[in-house]
Image (cartoon, rainbow, N blue to C red):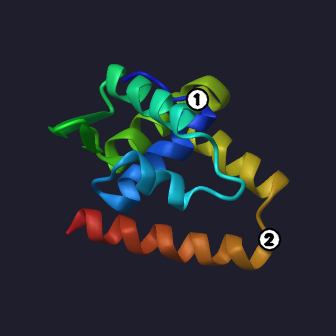
Amino acid sequence: MEKMTKKEEEIMNLIWKLKKALIRDVIAELPKPHPPHSTVSSVVRILEKKGFVTHETYGKTHLYFPKVNKSDYRKSTFKDLMEKYFDGSYKQLVSFMVEEELSEKEGEELKKHLQQQLKKKKS
């Protein structure tokens, strides 16, 4: 699956949120000052070219909607992150989180959550 730039991800997240959108709908969701219509339209067309969105045409208007769901993109992006930065090792990922970001309380909560998820997976 192709990757998105940060700007493409920002726009795609709005399209996922809206489920279907005109360019003006996307612009309305962006922080002010709003970018020009042509800029957002260009980004959406790039997303369409990359296969992330598709559209229906109503006269001169295009209604865009996701072609790839957010969950599938998240899985693909996470898999790439794991390979590039953690050699595919969850142990390395968790070690990094503990060393850099995770508080003791969050660590305990994560441990409980993982245990619950593993129990569900076994059942």
Residue 83 image offset from top left, x and y in percent = 55, 26
Residue 76 image offset from top left, x and y in percent = 41, 34
Q: Amino acid at mark 2?
A: Ser
Q: Quadrant of the N terminus?
A: top left
Q: Which residue is mark 1?
A: 5
In the image, 52: left or right of 30?
Answer: left
Image marks 1 and 2: residues in contact by CB distance under 8 Å = no
The answer to whether one can see residue 88 in this image is no
Crowd rating for badge 1 (residues with CA inside 10 Å; few <14, some 14–19, many 20+): few
Report the label total: 2
The numbered disc on residue 103 is 2
In the image, 110: left or right of 46?
Answer: right
Q: Quadrant of the C terminus?
A: bottom left
Which residue is most to the right?
100
Cα separation between marks 1 and 2: 31 Å
User: Which residue is at the front of the view, 78 or 65?
Assistant: 65
Q: From what the image shows, is residue 65 above or below residue 80?
A: below
Crowd rating for badge 2 (residues with CA inside 10 Å; few <14, some 14–19, many 20+): few
In the image, 40: left or right of 15?
Answer: right
Quarter of the figure with residue 73: top left
Residue visible at 37% across and 53% down in the picture: 16
